[in-house]
C-alpha cells in the first residue's frame, strides 16, 4: 500500500512538525531564560496591596473595547524576580480591544512580594486573570 519512500517522507514531515512545534512552545514560555523562573514555589509572589493594586494601574477602560462592548478575562503570565519586580508579562489568553495591553502594563507596573522556595527567594512565573467588565 505505502512504498518505502512514502513512509520515509511521512516520517521526515512528522519529525519536522515535532521540531517546529517544540520551538513554538519554547518561544511561548519565554525562551531560554524561562527556565530560570519556577512554575511553582512554596511561597508564590503576590501583588503588594492585592489585586486592587493591579487594577489601580488601569486608569480607564480601553476605548476600543468599550465601543465594541468587549469584556471578559485576560490571562497574563507574569515573570517576577527576586526583588518583586515584574520583568516580563505575556498574554496567555486575551480578549482584544486594548484590554490585553492594558492588563500587561498594569501587571508590569505593580510591585510584588517575591516568591520563595525552600527558604530561598526565587524568580517565579505567576498566572493572573484580569477582569474587564463594562458598567
Image (cartoon, rainbow, N blue to C red):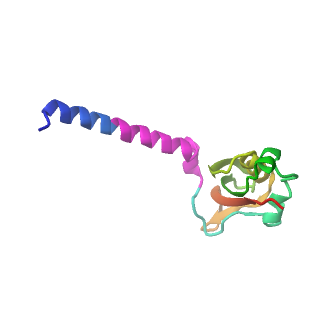
Residue 95 location (% of width, % of height): 67, 51
- Is 1 placed above or below 39 here? above
Q: Quadrant of the C terminus?
A: bottom right
Q: Residue furthest front?
A: 68
Which residue is at 75% across, 52% downward?
103
In this rendered view, identify the residue nearer to me: 12 or 34. Answer: 12
Q: Is residue 135 a member of the stretch shown in magenta?
A: no
Residue 38 location (% of width, % of height): 58, 57
Which residue is at 35% across, 35% downward?
16
- Left/right placement of residue 109 relative to residue 120 reads right
- Left/right placement of residue 99 relative to residue 94 reads right
Q: Quadrant of the N terminus?
A: top left
Residue 9 visible? The answer is yes
Q: Which residues are magenta?
A: 16-37
- Left/right placement of residue 105 relative to residue 18 reads right
In this rendered view, identify the residue nearer to me: 21 or 81. Answer: 21
Residue 28 location (% of width, % of height): 55, 45
Which residue is at 32% across, 38% downward?
15
Q: Main secondary structure of the magenta part?
A: helix
- Is 58 placed above or below 41 here? above
- Count of marks placed on residues: 0
Q: Quadrant of residue 118?
A: bottom right
- Is 116 placed above or below 88 here? below
Residue 90 location (% of width, % of height): 65, 48
- Left/right placement of residue 18 relative to residue 31 reads left
Residue 48 visible? The answer is no
Amino acid at each position: 500500500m505505502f512504498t518505502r519512500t512514502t513512509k520515509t517522507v511521512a516520517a521526515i514531515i512528522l519529525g519536522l512538525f515535532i521540531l517546529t512545534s517544540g520551538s513554538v512552545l519554547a518561544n511561548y514560555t519565554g525562551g531560554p531564560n524561562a527556565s530560570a523562573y519556577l512554575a511553582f514555589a512554596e511561597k508564590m509572589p503576590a501583588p503588594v496591596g492585592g489585586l486592587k493594586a493591579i487594577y489601580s494601574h488601569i486608569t480607564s477602560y480601553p476605548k476600543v473595547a468599550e465601543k465594541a462592548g468587549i469584556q471578559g478575562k485576560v490571562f497574563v503570565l507574569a515573570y517576577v524576580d527576586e526583588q518583586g519586580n515584574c520583568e516580563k508579562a505575556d498574554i496567555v489568553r486575551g480578549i482584544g480591544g486594548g484590554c490585553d495591553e492594558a492588563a500587561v502594563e498594569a501587571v508590569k507596573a505593580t510591585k510584588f512580594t517575591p516568591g520563595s522556595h525552600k527558604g530561598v527567594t526565587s524568580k517565579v512565573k505567576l498566572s493572573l486573570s484580569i477582569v474587564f467588565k463594562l458598567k
